[in-house]
Amino acid sequence: ATASPACVEYRGHGGGGISSCVFSMDDTRFFTIGQEDCCLIQWRVTQGGGVPVNEACSEDILVGTSALDLKDGEEFDRYDDTSASNIDDKTKLFFMEERAGDEDMATVKVWQKTALPPSRPPPERIDEPASALRLFWMYGFRALDCKQQVRYARPWGLPPSVVLEQAAMHGGHDNLVVFFGGAVSAVLDASNNSMTFHRDHSDEVTCIAVHPTRSLCATGQQGKHPYICVWDYRGTLAAKGGKGVPRATKETLVTLHGSHRTGVRNVCFSDCGKYLASLSLDEWHTLVVHDWENSHVVCTRRICRETPFDLAFVPQSLPPPSDFASSDHIDPPKLEVVMVGVNTIKFITITEGHNSSSKSATLGSDGIWQTFLCVGFLGVEPWTSNSQPPSSSSSSVSSASSSVASPVYKPRLSAMRTVVGCQDGCLYLLAGTKLNKAISAHSGPVNVISCHAEGMASGGHDGLVKVWKYADKTGLLTCTLVVDVAHYGSVLPVIRSLQFDCNTNRLLVATLAAEIFELSARDGASTVVGGGPLLQGHAHSDALTEVHGISAHPTLPRFATTADDATLRIWDADTSSVLAMTALEAPSRCCCFDPRGEKICVGLGSPIKKKAKQPDGKFVVLGVGDFGILFEGVTQGQRYLTDAKWSPSGSVVAFASADSKIYLFNADDGFALKASCVAHDAPIRSMDFSANSAYLLSNCSGGALNFFDADTGHLISEPTRIRDQKWVTCTSTMQWATGGCWPPQRDGTDVTCCDAIGPQFSPGIASGPSILATGDNFGRLKLFRYPCDSSLAHHKLYRAHGSAGPPPCYSKGKVPRPQPAPPPCTQGEGWAGLSNIKWVGQGKWLVSVAAREKVIFQWLHEYDVDGDDDASQATKYHCDPEERVAALGVEDAENEVLDGMIASQSSALASLNPDNAPKSSKKHSSSASTHSKKSKKHAASSTLSSMSVGTAGQEGDSDDDDEDRPQRPWLSALVEPSDPGAFGNPLALPNISAVSMERSFGVGVTVAGGSKQANIGYSGGKEGNLAVWASASYGVVYEKKSHSQGLYRGHGGASLGCISISPNGRYVATGEANKDRPLIKLWDAACCRELAT
């Protein structure tokens, strides 16, 4: 029964199973008998739960942008390579390195045939750069397929003195806003325009909830193995001062694993904050209720196959969590959760013993079953218990917050109503589980509602926010205020999140255009100076909308972006704000400032037709000051433009097109078409001008690298002519200077974008190292040294964006469905992880954007100029050309190439550590030259994994020549005895039944950092009467009184390298050494039983 998805599990009997079960004759009772506890349990059976047969049901479905809410289940799936990348699982890479087959290593790419190093390449350095990145700002949030993702963060659990201090610092109210985008949750302090982040998720965040009594948030994510993080949005209080002061990353208190699949759709706290409910994105949308502080699952229940939209605890008259232990009753209170969705309003009651029951609402003749989008509760008054709060002299915020009186909800049971927002624009008021009244509220779906003691606010698809006053005696809702968000300049005024804060009488509104507004609930006026949004990003009009275009201002700390929402925006990186925005004629995927920063060219078009006569292939040149149109032109192609570049001289503008051509225009002659570059056979991905404006370098989706004459557009068939050219930008990922950022294995990585900064690329930087930043289809941001031509180069890795998935398409139900992923380096339209990155402000900032997230991240670059430029203190790596080719991936490497790789690796080891160098590298090389190809591949694999090539190169197969085998002089001295039978039969087994380990003498010693450490410690709880140590492959537990040893044998012969004992002395962790994929074992010291691997 537990294996079937269409079942609900109930628990009542102890262990041992159930021997018999039977229904009563009227099917209202169910009886079970326990096999070992010998108990007879009678169960009550309640029928129903679906749509009543005699009630009306609508067949209308959500359409347009509302259909985005139907994204469910398989739309959130991740591929295995993506899941492994998110958690840095290198199992697949280990297998490929050990096997070292042709199918594992990357083949010779097309662009590698034309990527030539300069005639005098700089000394190769494979150490990571000293520069670092720090996430500083996030523009926009995940507005496409999530709701209620923007919330006020209120420190209700802080002492009164801290609350007053925070209120004074924030202008009389606590103005913290929490939201999420990508794999990051952000806390915006609107008072001093600063932002802090929570970054402990491994995949994209999907939902958020704020704790009612403490400064905590709960966030859930999607992924193959999703989890929920409960974290402190306050963290360490920030020092006073303005923006620019780095603030600490938010700390995760509890992580809830193992209860969800595919993702977490909704999450909510109970009124007292003790319980946390969540809905899974699996097929049956499993409801999980946690006692989150103890990481205990209170209840799990499969709900329904229909898509759910909202989840909330029914308010209860409960004491605060601190009073549970002192109260008379021991059993936990009965919890009730309401879930609404497609043709679904369910009340789930949770009782003791992991059991629950479900009851569907009754609408009668006044209501229609349809898609219900949101739920809340009216007539609930907050009150505070009589416990005294701590004194204002408390020094610890964290300790005080745990003991302060917790506000709990005391519902007026006779007047409390459940309010549900409907697809047809109505608000349903339910008394208990029965519909009491239906009120027409909006002209479209009611997307979100926010309730408080005296009323509520509703936000609709029509772009209106309405404030309602609730009369508990009559049960009527009266509209007191209507606000049109389009009045404040919203690009796409569809309400996606709404919160009514009755303490400050303000509304926090978020739209589908990734805008956050703060409005007065009294008159609807904006609280922001100038009436604009608190935060904004590019609009999320549909699942196929993407953001690609980024261009950095040549002198100022500003950058421009274009997207499929047909807008051009110029941002100020220092103030993290939008300076100007203008609407475009069509979607855009590329833009570029001119060398003086006075003009900006924008290429129009996208692979998705937004309208019948979309001008794909058209471009415009605008003035930066007023966005005045200076020129409009059209390329000869009919496809959208993918990249735009100005030459350093400013005389040529190049536009790359999806029709595989590059069009050159003369800026000094009225932007007349100068030439066309024709050589690629796939859409152009990127291009770069040479420093003298004479040449052009380009990459395409087919993996080709070509060079063109910027004057005539002719293909340069002999790249050796320009191998020493300097390039003014480095945005093409497939060239000699960026070849090392590609992994040597076929792990599915596609380096989608890059950009370099340093004295060569920026006149404002006089000295210092050059840094290469790259982004890939797994959402990873990496920093390398420039140039980076070795696949053995080290890098720094940063995560904030989510991972890329397959390009979505629409089925008949208007729901995006995933498609198979194209192979790396051949992605066409609609595929991207990180779509673009740019250095801004002379390298002070780095801006990154992921195509379908549509969230822009701004990173602060900590640029180390002094210490990093000292090349004498860095680890240098001198590779010969053959080894470099092998490291970049050669499918059919010849024997001499592998021999050269082994020899050069040995010499490299000798240069790095002369004490450990082989005595005769020539001998190793000559010995290796006679090995089979299989052995050499194994040796090459070993160099990539451990760089211990001296030993690997000497291992041969059984069919090697005799002259290559080591001689054994002692064989000639062997003499057979005159009577061999006296020694017994050498083929017979010894007469021994078994051999078992009895005792181990000696303690294993680990060499760490040049010092030897003994792997030994005390165990046995408070008494500490047991000594635990590692010896060979065993974990030894020694008891002094009985002089006996217990042995943990779970490592199977692998040598142990380290040991650690838990603080309570009960558990032991042992780690293996000298193994390709070492394991860590967790075991119980009392019984030497394994707990986990």
Image (cartoon, grey):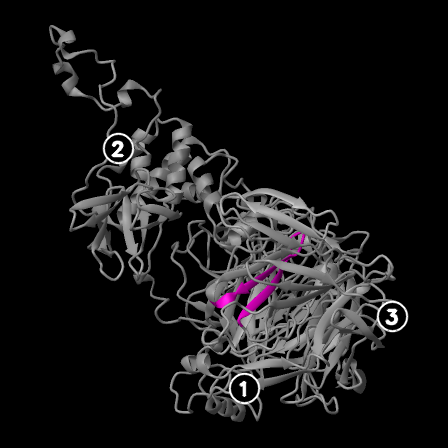
Label 2 crowd (10 A; few <14 / some 14-19 / many >=20): few
Residue 341: x percent and y percent?
A: 74, 62
Q: Earlier in the sequence, mark 1 or mark 3?
A: 1
User: Which residue is identified by label 2?
Assistant: 923
Residue at screen point 24% across, 42% down: 1032
Judged left or right of residue 635, residue 8 is left
Q: Which mark is residue 962?
A: none
Q: Quadrant of residue 641?
A: bottom right
Q: Secondary structure at mark 1?
A: loop
- Say if the magenta span includes residue 1088: no
Please name the amino acid that badge 3 sits on: Asp
Q: Main secondary structure of the magenta part?
A: strand
Please name the amino acid that badge 1 sits on: Asn
User: Which residue is identified by label 3?
Assistant: 366
Residue at screen point 48% across, 90% down: 160
Residue 113: x percent and y percent?
A: 55, 43
Q: Secondary structure at mark 2?
A: helix
Of tags 1 and 3, the one toward the viewer is 3
Query: Magenta part of the protein: which range?
Result: 274-293
- The quadrant of the picture occupied by the N terminus is top right
Pointers 1 and 2 in contact (CB under 8 A)? Answer: no
Residue 277: x percent and y percent?
A: 59, 65
Of tags 3 and 2, the one toward the viewer is 3
Q: What is the spatial separation of the Cα atoms under label 1 and label 3, in whole angstroms?
A: 50 Å
User: Which residue is identified by label 1?
Assistant: 192
Of tags 1 and 2, the one toward the viewer is 1
Please name the amino acid that badge 2 sits on: Lys
